[in-house]
Amino acid sequence: MRGGGVLEKPVPHALVASKKELHGWWSGIEPNGARECTAERLLINPYNGCSHRCFFCYALAFPGYFERFRREGIVTVFKDFDKVVSRQLDTLNVASCGYLSPVTDPFQPINRRYELAEKIIEEFVRRNIPVNVVTKGVVSGKALKLLKRQEHSFAQITILTLDEELRRKLMQGGASVDELLKNIERLSDAGIFTVCRIDPVLPFVTDDEAELRALVAAAKERGAMHIVASCVDIPLNTKSEILRKIEAEFGEDVRRRYERLFTERIGPRLHADIGYRRRLFRTLREICRRHNVTFALCMEFERLPNGRLRGLNAEFKTSNNCEGIDVPIYVRRDDRFEPVAGCDGNCLKCYFEGKPPACGIPELAKAGAWRLKDYKRWSASLK
């Protein structure tokens, strides 16, 4: 053990007690349009910091435990977080699909020691609530079996490139390309809806059209049914570090091209020129069409002259929900939850169409940034 309670194996990490709460998306559609996520999710992060170490990771710009990881390489593990999640779920009569995890990889090496990912999935499945996992690692056999048991549960596997040497330049850890493709195959063979995320695409590094065609083809061949993509953005807090890494790995010319391309500021991040992004997404949409898989974007916006944001999914998405699968809201029936009949989970569509939601919770049709207290308020009204 290192000083300050830091444990060294399997990676430097610290155990922390936490009462942090399940919650929904960070931003709602109002007041400025900063939401592209169509469906509600309960976001779960049992770890802060990720030893996959993608140099472009936006979470490195976050404060608190994320900053500690950035500076010291120490992953924070929220001790017994599955028990915290369990207690919170027991206070609810309405739930959306769990999301494990939106910020740090649930199957990074530290999970092999603590198995918080599997324990949390089990808490959802025990109550008949679906859960979604997103990873650049290897989905464990135990997690796969749990996902297979639960209706509407699904998995998303992120593959940045089919070039293993290039992948290692982009991230220090994570599963190999072969392991990631095998992930898709294992999940698909088990009957689990599986998404391949090309998220993010790095301009001038992984945006070659022929390589993108090969990646989509390989994912489809292994069983992926949907593709999610984005273009990398650059947090202002870590801009200099990212550009130094770009130059070190890909040369000074690529760095200069990044400085010329990333000129559009949205919030605390720089985004690639909207013209470049539109060309990239048109290309990806057409590739997906040819391979008969649906396509959507993740958190891609255009800033309008009035300052409001417009999500680009309205222009490019070919699926109903942005993750390619319709997962309804679930409500408690006695000792377990059941899906709401007639609900396709697309709360953003309810917002734009102004229709009464099938779930009977008018606030969900506002596509807001919901917290646990909101779920508890809806639960009280349903009870």
Image (cartoon, rainbow, N blue to C red):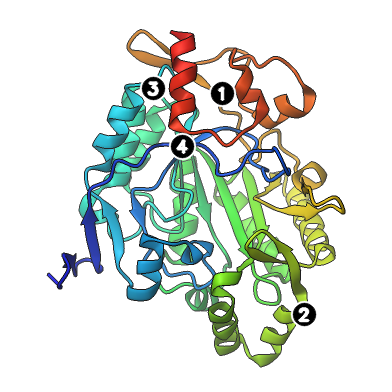
Labels 2 and 3: the sequence-earlier one: 3
Residue that badge 4 annotates: 23
Q: Quadrant of the N terminus?
A: bottom left
Q: Amino acid at mark 1?
A: Pro
Q: Can I make out residue 49 in this image?
A: no
Q: CA distance from mark 3 to mark 1?
A: 12 Å
Residue that badge 2 annotates: 260
Identity of the residue furthest to the left in this view? 1
Residue that badge 3 annotates: 128
Q: Using the image, determine if residue 169 lies above or below residue 375.
A: below
Label 2 crowd (10 A; few <14 / some 14-19 / many >=20)? few
Q: Looking at the image, is mark 2 or mark 3 nearer the viewer?
A: 2
Q: Quadrant of the C terminus?
A: top left
Judge from the rendering whether residue 149 lies leftward or rightward of residue 213; answer left or right. left
x, y percentage for residue 241? 53, 80
Whether tag 4 and tag 2 are in contact, CB under 8 A, the answer is: no
Judge from the rendering whether residue 270 lies leftward or rightward of residue 309; answer left or right. left
Q: Look at 30% across and 59% down and name the residue there.
A: 76
x, y percentage for residue 320? 70, 33
Q: CA distance from mark 1 to mark 4?
A: 17 Å
